[in-house]
Each structure stands twice: as structure tokens, then as C-alpha cells.
Image: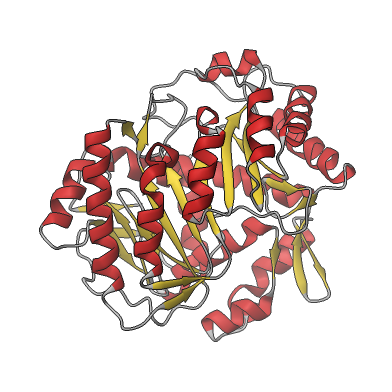
Amino acid sequence: MSIVTTLTRMWLTRTTKPFTFTNQYDRTLPYSECDGLGLYVHIPFCRSICTFCPYCKTVYSKEKCDRYIDALLKEIELVGNQRNGRKTVTSLYFGGGTPALAADRIGEIISALQKHFEITEGIGLELHPDNVTPETLRTLKAAGVTKISIGIQSFLPKFQKILGRRPVDARAMAAALREVDFETVSMDFIFALPEQTLDDLKSDIDAAFATGANHVAIYPFIDFTFTGGNVKPLGKRQKRDMLDKITDYCLGKGLKRDSIWTFSSEKDAKYSSMTRDNFLGFGCSATTLLRKQFKINTFSVEEYIKRIGGGNLPTSLTIHFTQRQRMIYYLFWTLYSTRLDPNDFEKFFGVPLKKMYGLEFSLARLLGFLTLENGIYKMTLKGAFYYHHYENYYTLSYIDKMWGIMRKQAFPEKIEL
């Protein structure tokens, strides 16, 4: 698989050199110069570990969680004190893990961030279905959370069993969501599971909106090598058929598509921590993307706490981009929204998109991956599928390798991808 991503990388970056991450990092992060900056906070604790989940997580204990959050608050100070005044940012998202396990301290984290950052587009937080209770929701809303994302994966017992999840009490969840109102209530689902049908996925989507969602995210199952699971996803042809048909189904119901995988029933219902030009990440495994660099924090909770305790950033690996590398990162994640405005690209990089990648975009239009409407590139159904297909290669070739190493080594010396 890696040959696909390797050849694509070489062509798009116009060099044979790999992406090289090293353990050297900037102690002062140049985020003051970044427009459209987002914030992300990682809380890695879960009651139990799902084998299908690749993200950095560990079994919850209150003592360990409190020590971690104490260190997290210090990391926020280390970064926030690098500039005078408050920096305007777009949004703040909490991921995990299960951030709601620390619901009683979320307000403390938000206050620490608001000391240094002015958040203009709301605060989102991920929840496990077990955490969707009136008490927890009220605590989160009082802390300032305006958007929530609930990791349902599936309401159907046969897929809950495959994924090792407990049944979801949809009635109790609906009652809790009626009692405590949020701007966005998103629910996550996985598609391309063994023997999953289009009717199964339709059932889950209908159940989500009936239960109180105004936004859904439908992600493909990816078989990471290090998770220890034995679930095998559907084949390529079945995946494409399902993605195309579920997209048609959602659009036919009048839902608005705001990214490859997400659909909303209300205009202002949005939930995405990924589509940002730049972002700062706090917590173990959190990533930071700036104009000329990308860094990732250590995956080890204990080493994270130790590094912060010494007054140092918990950076494990950093890549300093070439211009072409940064352009590829920008294009990959901007197209996740299914749209690309060439004017935004030129504003960000100071050079026209046509000059840098005119051939590639002309070819994408010729192959039916993109259309050009009123100067805006828009992704077709065919383009959305092949974006997903390439992302699958990218994930298994790059992310799987990097995260697999970082789960074992807190501070690797170097990784080449």
C-alpha cells in the first residue's frame, strides 16, 4: 500500500525526500502570525478500551486524570504566556478518550484557555453514550460547551457486538438531550462494517435525528494494525456503493453536506475539529499545525506529565515543512470539506493555485473528481469516494506507522514517512 502514497507524495511535493519528523522542536511556537487558528485539547481517559479505536487513550482513574489535567493547565500556560494579550481563535474542541469523564474540570480548562485566547465560534466536546445524562450535560453547558459529539458507532445490537460496545438507551439519551439544549448535537457512526447494509446505515441515521441529533458524522472503518481488533471492513466496491447511496439518501432527506463524512439538518449545526488552516493542540498525542511546521505531543501520559513538570513542552516529533509539503497538507484537509476556493489558497500561500497545481486540478476535473462552479472547486460523489480511498492508503501507510511507533516510544529520535 505504501507505494501509492509514496509515489503521490513524490509527485505532489516534487521531491524524492520523505516526510521527516525529528525530536527537535521550537520552544516558542510562532502562532501569533496564524489566522484562522483553532484549539484542540486531548483527554485520553476511557472507562474501557475499544479495540477498534486507534486514538491515544488509557483506562480512567480519577487520581491519574487529575494529575494529567494539572499538567495540561501548565502546558496551556507555557504556550499562552509566549505572547502578550489574547489571541483570537475560531474554536475549541475536546477529544479523547472520553473528555466527559473529567466534566467537573472542563470549566477549569476552558477558563485557562480563555485567559490567553478569545474563542469566536464555540466549544465542542466528545461524549461516550454513557455520559449523555442530564447531570453531565448541565455541567458541560455551564462550563461553556456549545457543541457535543456522541460516539454512537451504531444503534444496532449486531454491530455493537462486533465493536465491543454496550447497548445504547436511546430513550434516556433523547430525554437528556431535550432537557439540556446545545447548538450542535452530532452523532458519530461507522460504515463499511462486516455484513453492514445500506438499510442498516439508514436506520442508524434516522435513529440519530429521532433521538435529538442535528448533525451526523459517518466515518469509514479503518483496520489499524496496532489496535488488536479482528474486524475486517467491507471491500472497495461495496464501500463505494454504500458511500454513494448513503450520500444520496442524506441529500434526499434535505440534509446539508458540510464535509466528506458529515451531514446536518440545521444550517448552523457544525462539528469538525479538523478543517482548520492552523491549530494548537494541548495534551498527550495532540497535534499542532502552524504555517511552517507540524508537531505532535508524546503519547505517554506519564512522560507528558513529567515533561511538563520540568517546564518543557511535551513535543515528541516535529516536521518543518517545505512550501510544497505545507501546500499538500492544506489541500488535503481543505478538500475534506468537499470545497476549495483558489482565492483562499492564494491568500494563504501568496501564489496562485493554478501555478502550483493547475495540471493536477485540470486532471481531477477531467476524471470527474471535481467540478468548477463560479470559481469554486466542488467534489463529486466519485471524487468523495476516491478521497476516502486515498485517505485509507494514507492512514495505513503513514498514520498507522507513526502512531504505532509512538505508542511504544514516548520520544522517538526520528520517523521518516
Q: Is residue 202 left or right of residue 69?
A: right
Q: Nearer the viewer, residue 293 or 53?
A: 53
157, above or below 111, in the image: above
Q: Which residue does the image show at 68% across and 49% down from the upper left?
A: 260
In this picture, is 265 found above or below 165?
below
Q: Is residue 226 above or below residue 275?
A: above
Asked if residue 235 can be seen in this view, the reply is yes
Q: Nearer the viewer, residue 92 or 413?
A: 92
Name the residue rendered at 58%, 17% in the picture: 167
Image: 158 above or below 207: above
Q: Is 202 on the left-hand or right-hand side of 171?
A: right
Residue 278: % across, % down: 47, 69
Q: Residue furthest left?
A: 310
| Residue 36 image offset from top left, x and y in percent | 53, 73
- Residue 334 percent coordinates (x, y): 60, 63
In front of the other: 232 or 17? 232
Q: Residue lying farthest bottom? A: 350
- Number of numbered discs overlaid on the protein picture: 0
**Relative horizontal placement of residue 67, taking residue 251 as reference (left or right):** left
Please state the horizontal and vertical placement of residue 162, each as a whole percent of the image: 55, 16
Q: Can see residue 14? A: no
